[in-house]
């Protein structure tokens, strides 16, 4: 469970909208036909699974988002059908939430990771949570209701990088809803919906990278870029500065060294890197520098603590970007500044080749955002863009650690790929990525609330 509060798994909202008459009527009908609560859960699951086809199975392009949307349109992708099942069950007091898997789509053609949605449901009769997959069966899919053994639509193949996120969330993931709402067609949604990557998966990927000893040195260190960032930000005496996604502390150590009268905190989920940073800080005598671990969601700091939050080459790994930016706003003082340095897709890259390319390395890449997307995301959290500059990074990838790279290159427009200056050697691939360097200010003092 994401939270111990069962009421969170019973709420009605604009996704699980069982206040709509059509949803309530369906729940009433299925409940009246059931012998007990468990039988009602089974009936509701099988009804959603079998009555409403998966949009892709019937080649339908309309995008249903909420429970009532599925009833109106008559079909939905896995996420939409999970929203409908949760709404029906919640309507009759059955706690239900949302679960996610990261799976590979089209293994033999153009393998890419996708987000698969299903439900977690609480069975009072057995005092246990089970997962149910209402995606819809077909010749190669046979998901069933089962109390004792999971019978989901797809087996998770860990050896191929697929994974289960076993958490039952009371709310659908922000990136799922945002992608569904902003996509005019299912075809567009397939391009916009990134894979659901758990924080644990991101942590494991980075631990492997840090263990190699060359990850940050090879791929992200750039003295000229670092000098430009520090000149751009103008730290003042006494400031409290948070380096979000600090990694090896590349930014945090330099800020602490150049600004001994400021307090610098490096925050990350990768404990091995943080331990190395702590030892280094002690050896080098940086008394104004500390490193803190967190769970990848809620920052372990009080409201309004920091004058500046910086994030360099880290935010594209954050699974819950809206939540994280809300936390940035919460811990910033009024008039505090938030600096983002992160690569962006090229303007011609509408199908996001660069994201498919970056996901070849199993380190939890989610998505690069455009400047306008950052303005939109941050604006909803009370952060206004004040200034910016552009830079670029030449990014290498070893072929032997990026299985499927040939398929990714073959499945995208050659003109788009060429725009990234792709270059191949016998062992590596290089692309050049443009980088957003954006400065936001928290003018309102709303601390992460929706405006």
Image (cartoon, rainbow, N blue to C red):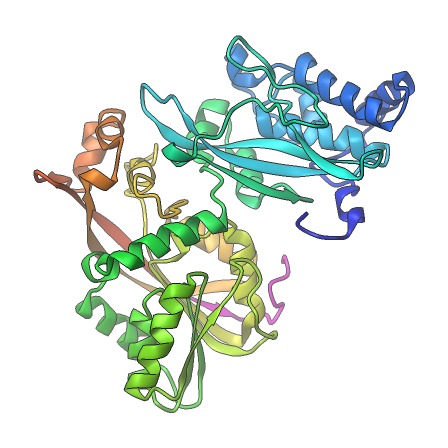
Most extreme residue toward the left, as rendered?
426
- In the image, what residue occupies the spot 34% across and 78% down? 279
Residue furthest front in the image:
148
Q: Is residue 301 above or below residue 415?
A: below
Question: In the image, is residue 448 part of the stretch drawn in magenta?
Answer: yes
Classify residue 144 as left or right of residue 438: right
Q: Nearer the viewer, residue 326 or 346?
A: 326
Q: Quadrant of residue 437?
A: bottom left
From the top left corner, tell me how far across and down residue 193 is, in percent: 47, 35
For the question of whether residue 352 can be seen, the reply is yes
* Residue 308 percent across, percent down from the top left: 44, 75
Residue closer to the observer: 295 or 124: 124
Name the image quarter holding residue 94: top right
Q: Residue at x 43, y 54 (%)?
A: 203
Please state which of residues 319 and 155 is positioned toward the viewer in this rendering: 155
Name which residue lies at 32% across and 89% down.
285
Q: Is residue 80 left or right of residue 262?
A: right
Q: Of 291 and 229, which appears nearest the observer?
A: 291
What residue sits 79% from the left and 41% below the top? 10
Task: Tell me residue 191's x, y (percent).
Answer: 41, 31
Most common SS among magenta residues: loop
Q: In which quadrant is the C terminus drawn?
A: bottom right
> Bounds of the magenta span?
438-451
């Amino acid at each position: 469970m994401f939270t111990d509060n069962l009421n969170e798994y019973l709420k009605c909202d604009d996704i699980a909208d069982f206040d709509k008459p059509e949803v309530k009527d369906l729940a009433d009908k299925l409940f009246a036909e059931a012998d007990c609560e468990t039988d009602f859960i089974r009936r509701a699951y099988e009804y959603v699974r079998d009555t409403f086809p998966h949009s892709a199975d019937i080649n339908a392009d309309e995008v249903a988002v909420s429970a009532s949307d599925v009833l109106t349109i008559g079909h939905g992708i896995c996420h939409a059908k999970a929203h409908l099942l949760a709404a029906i069950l919640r309507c009759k007091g059955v706690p239900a939430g949302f679960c996610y898997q990261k799976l590979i789509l089209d293994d033999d053609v153009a393998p890419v990771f996708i987000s698969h949605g299903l439900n977690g449901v609480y069975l009072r009769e057995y005092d246990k949570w089970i997962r149910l997959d209402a995606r819809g069966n077909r010749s190669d899919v046979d998901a069933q209701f089962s109390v004792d053994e999971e019978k989901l639509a797809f087996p998770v193949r860990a050896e191929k990088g697929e994974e289960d996120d076993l958490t039952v969330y009371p709310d659908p993931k922000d990136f799922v809803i945002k992608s569904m709402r902003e996509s005019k067609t299912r075809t567009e949604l397939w391009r916009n919906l990134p894979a659901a990557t758990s924080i644990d998966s991101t942590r494991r990927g980075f631990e492997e990278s840090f263990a190699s000893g060359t990850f940050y040195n090879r791929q992200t260190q750039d003295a000229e870029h670092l000098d430009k960032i520090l000149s751009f930000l103008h730290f003042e005496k006494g400031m409290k500065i948070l380096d979000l996604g600090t990694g090896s502390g590349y930014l945090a150590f330099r800020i602490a060294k150049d600004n001994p009268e400021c307090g610098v905190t490096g925050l990350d989920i990768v404990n091995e890197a943080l331990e190395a940073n702590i030892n280094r800080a002690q050896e080098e005598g940086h008394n104004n520098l500390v490193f803190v671990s967190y769970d990848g969601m809620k920052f372990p700091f009080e409201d309004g603590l920091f004058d500046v939050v910086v994030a360099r080459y880290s935010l594209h790994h954050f699974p819950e970007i809206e939540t994280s930016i809300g936390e940035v706003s919460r811990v910033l003082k009024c008039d505090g500044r938030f600096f983002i340095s992160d690569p962006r897709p090229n303007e011609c890259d509408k199908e996001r080749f660069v994201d498919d390319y970056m996901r070849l390395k199993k380190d939890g890449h989610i998505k690069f955002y455009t400047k306008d997307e950052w303005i939109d995301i941050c604006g909803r959290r009370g952060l206004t863009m004040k200034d910016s500059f552009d830079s670029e990074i030449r990014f290498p990838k070893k072929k032997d650690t990026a299985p499927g790279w040939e398929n990714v290159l073959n499945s995208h427009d050659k003109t788009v790929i060429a725009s990234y200056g792709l270059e191949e050697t016998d062992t590596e691939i290089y692309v050049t990525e443009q980088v957003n360097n954006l400065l936001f200010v928290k003018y309102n003092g709303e601390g992460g609330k929706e405006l």
